[in-house]
Amino acid sequence: MRWLSDDKLNHLRSVVSEPDFSATKYTFVKELGRGGMGVVCLAEDRELDRLIAIKILNTPDITEDLRNRMIREAQIIARLEHPGIVPVHDAATLADGRMFYAMKYVRGSRLDEYAAQGASLRDRLRKFQAVCDAVAFAHAHGVIHRDLKPQNIMIGSFGEVLVLDWGVAKLLDREDRSYSSYRTYSNSDDTMEGAVIGTRNYMSPEQARGEVDQLDERADIYSLGAVLSFLLKDQPKVSKAAHAISSKATATSKEKRYSTASELSADIGRLLDAEPVSAYRENAFERTSRWVGKNRFLVLLVLAYLLMRIFLIFTSRR
Amino acid sequence: MSKPLIGVILGAVLGAIDGLTAWFTPAVRDQLFGIVFGSTIKGIIAGVAIGFFARKFHSLPIGILFGVLVGAILAWLVAFMQGGYYFQIILPGTLVGLIVGFATQKYGNTPATAN
């Protein structure tokens, strides 16, 4: 009898654990990542001859009602046509009964990797503002993401920002407790399932308590604030206004947070334009230094003019 | 705020300051009111011209160059009418034109144009 080598054994293991795409138009290429909610794979769309990302949800004991509901939600998410939202191409079921979503395969870096590459504070804020705009668009269409975190935000090769993983998104004004009845979660960066859906470090208090029916846009705003806080971390010279924006977005009481993602985006825009932000009341000194910083060249010109005037006064007296 | 308005305000303020500095020249101190008035009017004229130019042409270097030219020409006219103090009048006048040229290109709204 011949024993199988470790390599062959590992290969057999990986083949067995591969998702069964036989009933679909996709061919498995490789696994991209694994989280609490499921596994993301790179696959090839044989019909259109392109690479796509497929997220397979860990819900093998899915009921017909739940399946229909998730397909309906996938359809609504697929309608979110925005440059900052990764498009959903397909939603169906594998041979083993697991649901999957097919999405655009985005080449680039995740927001956490982008930040680790030494992006400047200004660039980070610009990317963050694009995330807020995409989330605001989804909110305007009645969809909340529920799992916003740096790992779910991609910066494409041309600097474009895409919010991924809408697989656990919730439709506002909808009953969706039927697939939120259990909770299993692992470490702090993995997405939790069930009543507690999201990621611990980026999850609003009401979401962490499993108050599914209490969730609204402000749960995402909390997560956005946590993402902002992550982007500000380790950055030198972060203004008080930037910290105030992050604190307001991550307020424990949702009534104290920004009421919309557009408001948060607008405050980030004001911060980038060196204008006063709604989250921070600055004193006269801070207001003056911000104005001088913003209009540095004009101030220098006026100073040069005044110096020239003084020079002329002294020379004309001689 | 519109670009011509920014030009008018900045031109008037800097023009007035320009005129007020004549107080430090004892020979012309008794004509201070006339100098301040004339200088303010000169600043306003320069501000209007530079502001309207900025509304039409959106280019920082060209705007600054136009401001310098307008400031210098108007200051030269004033000095010519005064019959002296060319350097003391043209240099600040030119600098005022430069500042107004910069400010009108950088700040202020341009009205939307209909297609």
Image: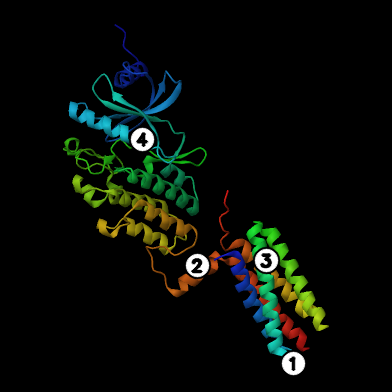
Nearest to viewer (mark 3 / mark 2): 3
Instruction: Give the residue number, with chain letter if any, for mark 4.
Output: A79
Instruction: Give the residue number, with chain letter if any, for mark 1.
Output: B26
Instruction: Give the residue number, with chain letter if any, for mark 3.
Output: B50
For badge 4, the amino acid type reads Arg
Nearest to viewer (mark 4 / mark 1): 4
- Subunit that carries the residue with mark 4: A
Of A33 and B91, nearer the camera is B91
x, y percent for residue A50? 45, 23
Q: Residue at x 56, y 61 (%)?
A: B109
Q: Quadrant of the N terminus of chain A?
A: top left
Mark 3 vs mark 2: tell me if same chain: no
Q: Residue at x 25, y 25 (%)?
A: A98
User: Which structural element holds mark 1?
Assistant: helix
For badge 3, the amino acid type reads Ile
Nearest to viewer (mark 2 / mark 4): 4
- Subunit that carries the residue with mark 2: A
CB atoms of marks 4 and 1 within 8 Å: no
- Between disc 3 and disc 1, whose residue precedes? 1
CB atoms of marks 3 and 2 within 8 Å: no
Mark 3 vs mark 1: tell me if same chain: yes
